[in-house]
Each structure stands twice: as structure tokens, then as C-alpha cells.
Image (cartoon, rainbow, N blue to C red):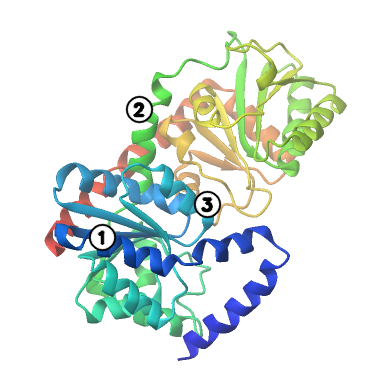
């Protein structure tokens, strides 16, 4: 009862915000008439005797983690329908673009009546949640109907409030209803034991590794080089950078150049709108370097000393990671590090700022010695000097490669176990 009251007042607050915020307004606009659309679609296929597997992902990133399973189900199962629900507009948009989902919809707010309506219409064999977005009323109602329930790539960070009082009161019943929780690590599994049935928990690893490997194998490994590398130079690719990242990197580069280190920097900012690119061009010029904009030059790009490539285009970063000698991953000075998996698959030595607690794989790579945390520009300078030594760089790269290789295979384990559930 209290849970629904919180949803009610939370939705009122969100609707007020939607009057001034386009993203929030879109959230509610996408849900207008959605219950009717769901009902009409599943009524239209009622006589086809399709078995339904229902995936739920909060956003586009969680959909990526579900894709290895979706791909396998579509390939191996006949007379099967894949339904997918999403919480965020970006997730819904990504789902529509992905060709292996039969029906995408925006999940209505988690009132009990909405849960009952959806289950009446969809009648799934199993609901598979991706990563963390488990909806309490939907899960409990599905359990009553003997619908199988699973949470894949499950993570419960140490700082999460979900397993701490009083918030655990709203989540424990849902997690205890799950037939399987496929935890990404032993540490996550231990935390899940505080709010879930220990027997339901299996340490499987993270399906993101399998998904990224598939994408890289199918696309980026076959792509042409972006950089025309010169012998004797070390190339640093800095991905998903913000102002503080760029400032520290440029200060470190200045120190390196003062020591006659032959280092070339490529910046891939997190935001590539014209205003941010213009700001970055000016910053680079103010430090005594010449900015080169990716969109304005032919490829592969031959960079001279004192030139810095600024990537002002989408879809380039993973390809650049392949060509790097050293990688810096951004977000790590701003509050939470971005994904380190793309450079990890290529076995690159990785540098970050101090904020990596949001990323299990970043923490593990630091522990293994493949990732180095740099608190400021001098820290960056010091670690880059270490990695300019080929033996040091190879050692770090080997540890990263080994970690990634050992981390693949979660999808096969999960699929095999889900077959038992079904």
C-alpha cells in the first residue's frame, strides 16, 4: 500500500516537472494510450499460439545486456515472440531500432492494476529483467501466476540503497519472488543474499562482455584505421571526456612535451555539439597546440607534433580504442567512470580519474594492475611516463586482455539455466 502511495505522489511530482522539462514530458507522452496498444497487439496474435518471452530494460544500456539472450532465442526457438518493455524513452527508441524484438512498449507505472492488465494481455512464459530494474508489483503478481522470473547481469553496488533499511522494504518482496538472480560477481551475490533467496542466486558474470565482443568482432575489427600512426610516437586516445578531463590531459601533455616525450593525444568528448567542440578547439589552442577536427579532414589522419585530434562525430570511439597505445576513459573526474569494456576488449592499458566505484570491471582491472587511477594532471603525467616504457605497457595490456577473456561466456551459462526453468 505504501509503495503505491509513493508511486502516486512521485508521479504527481514528475508531471509537474514535465511542464518545464521536455525529457520528462516525453516520458508521459509515450505512455499515453500504451495500455490499449498492448491489449490490441496481443489480442491480434491470440490465435497464433505464440510463446512469449518478456524482457524489461530500464534504458538502452540494459537492452545491450539483454541482446545476447534475445539473439539466441530468436535463432534457436520457433513459434516464439519477444516482447520488450522499457522505462526510459532512450531505451524504447533503441528497442524499436533493434530488429529482433517483435513488440516494444513503454512500461506503465507500477500500480497493481497495471501489472494485472499487462500479465492478462501478454501471458509470458518468463519475464527477464536486465541489470537492476525490477518492478515490485509486476514481479509479485507474476509470481502468483507462476510466471518464471529472472534478473540477468544483476548488480547491487555497495552504495546501493536497495538492500538497506528502509528502502529494502520496497524491494525485498520483489527480489525474493525471482526464480533466478544471475549476479555479475561474488561481491554482488553476497549483497543480494540480504534481500533475496540465496538458492536463487547464481554467479554468472556480465553479458555485456559477450555483447561487446560480438559488436567488435562483427564491425570494428574489420574497419579501416582512423589514424595513420608514425613510428616512435605514442598515441593516447581519451574517450568520453569532460572539461576537467581535458584540462588535466592537456596539462599532463604539456609536461610530457617539455620532457621531449613524443606523445600524440586524441580527444573524444562526451558531448559533440558545435558549442562544445568550439570550446574545446579554443582550449587546445590556448595550451599551444593546433586543434584538428575529425569531421573536416581526410582519413586516415596523419597528426604532426603539437596537433591534437578532436573527434566531432558519433560511432568512432571504439574504432579509435583499437588503434591506441594508451587509453584514458572519461567521466572519472566528474563522478562516475564511463565504460572501460571497449578498450578492455582490445587489451589496452587504461587510465582513469579517481571516481570508478560505479564500475565493477574498472575496480577489478585496477586490482589486477591493468587500470591506473590518476587523481590529477600530475598523476596522469606520472602514469603516462610509466606506460611509455614498452615492458610496463605490455604488462598492463596483458592483464586487461586476460580479464576480458575470462569474463566472457555469461550468456551461455544463463541460457543453459533458463532452459531448465522453462
How far apart, in angstroms, are the residues tagged by discs 1 and 3? Answer: 27 Å
Find residue 69 and report its horizontal and vertical position in percent: 27, 49
Q: From this viewpoint, which residue is outermost toward the top?
A: 231
Is residue 88 toward the left or the right of residue 235 in the image? left
The residue lying at 41 percent from left, 31 percent from top is 398
Instruction: Say whether marks 1 and 3 touch (CB < 8 Å).
Output: no
Find residue 243 and report its horizontal and vertical position in percent: 75, 42
Q: Secondary structure at mark 1?
A: helix
Q: Which residue is mark 3?
A: 90
Mark 1 closeness class: few <14, some 14–19, many ≥20 residues within 10 Å: few
Q: Nearer the viewer, residue 138 or 45?
A: 45
Q: Nearer the viewer, residue 391 or 121?
A: 121
Q: Secondary structure at mark 3?
A: helix
Q: Which residue is mark 1?
A: 44
The residue lying at 63 percent from left, 11 percent from top is 298
Q: Which of the 4 image quadrants contains residue 199?
A: bottom left
Q: Which residue is mark 2?
A: 218
Q: Secondary structure at mark 2?
A: helix
Instruction: Say whether marks 2 and 3 touch (CB < 8 Å).
Output: no
Mark 1 or mark 2, whichever is nearer to me: 1
Q: Is residue 373 above or below residue 315?
A: below
Q: Quadrant of the N terminus?
A: bottom left
Find residue 14 and report its horizontal and vertical position in percent: 63, 72
Amino acid at each position: 500500500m505504501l509503495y503505491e502511495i509513493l508511486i502516486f505522489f512521485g508521479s504527481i511530482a514528475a508531471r509537474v516537472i514535465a511542464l518545464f522539462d521536455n525529457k520528462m514530458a516525453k516520458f508521459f507522452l509515450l505512455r499515453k494510450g500504451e495500455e490499449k496498444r498492448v491489449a490490441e497487439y496481443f489480442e491480434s496474435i491470440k490465435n497464433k499460439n505464440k510463446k512469449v518471452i518478456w524482457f524489461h530494460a530500464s534504458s538502452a544500456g540494459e537492452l545491450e545486456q539483454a541482446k545476447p539472450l534475445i539473439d539466441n532465442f530468436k535463432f534457436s526457438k520457433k513459434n516464439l515472440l519477444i516482447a520488450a518493455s522499457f522505462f526510459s524513452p532512450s531505451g524504447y527508441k533503441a528497442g524499436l531500432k533493434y530488429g529482433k524484438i517483435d513488440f516494444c512498449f513503454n512500461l506503465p507505472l507500477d500500480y497493481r492494476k497495471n501489472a494485472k492488465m499487462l500479465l492478462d494481455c501478454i501471458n509470458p512464459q518468463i519475464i527477464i529483467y536486465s541489470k537492476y530494474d525490477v518492478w515490485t508489483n509486476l514481479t509479485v503478481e507474476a509470481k502468483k501466476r507462476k510466471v518464471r522470473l529472472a534478473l540477468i547481469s544483476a548488480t547491487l553496488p555497495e552504495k546501493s540503497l536497495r538492500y538497506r533499511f528502509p528502502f529494502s522494504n520496497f524491494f525485498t518482496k520483489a527480489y525474493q519472488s525471482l526464480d533466478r538472480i544471475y549476479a555479475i560477481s561474488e561481491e554482488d551475490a553476497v549483497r543480494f543474499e540480504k534481500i533475496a533467496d540465496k538458492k536463487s542466486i547464481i554467479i554468472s558474470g556480465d553479458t555485456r562482455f559477450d555483447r561487446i565482443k560480438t559488436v567488435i568482432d562483427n564491425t570494428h575489427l574489420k574497419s579501416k584505421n582512423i589514424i595513420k600512426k608514425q613510428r616512435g610516437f605514442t598515441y593516447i586516445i581519451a574517450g568520453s571526456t569532460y572539461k576537467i578531463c581535458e584540462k588535466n590531459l592537456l596539462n599532463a601533455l604539456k609536461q610530457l612535451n617539455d620532457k621531449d616525450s613524443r606523445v600524440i593525444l586524441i580527444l573524444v568528448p562526451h558531448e559533440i555539439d558545435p558549442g562544445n567542440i568550439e570550446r574545446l578547439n579554443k582550449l587546445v589552442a590556448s595550451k599551444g597546440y593546433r586543434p584538428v577536427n575529425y569531421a573536416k579532414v581526410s582519413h586516415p589522419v596523419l597528426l604532426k607534433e603539437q596537433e591534437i585530434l578532436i573527434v566531432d562525430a558519433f560511432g568512432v570511439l571504439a574504432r579509435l580504442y583499437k588503434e591506441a597505445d594508451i587509453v584514458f576513459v572519461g567521466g572519472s573526474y566528474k563522478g562516475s567512470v564511463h565504460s572501460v569494456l571497449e578498450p578492455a576488449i582490445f587489451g589496452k592499458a587504461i587510465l582513469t580519474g579517481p571516481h570508478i566505484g560505479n564500475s565493477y570491471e574498472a575496480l577489478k582491472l585496477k586490482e589486477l594492475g591493468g587500470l591506473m587511477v590518476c587523481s590529477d594532471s600530475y598523476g596522469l603525467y606520472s602514469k603516462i611516463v610509466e606506460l611509455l616504457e614498452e615492458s610496463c605497457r605490455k604488462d598492463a595490456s596483458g592483464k586487461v586482455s586476460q580479464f576480458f577473456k575470462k569474463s566472457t561466456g555469461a550468456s551461455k551459462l544463463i541460457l543453459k539455466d533458463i532452459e531448465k526453468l522453462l
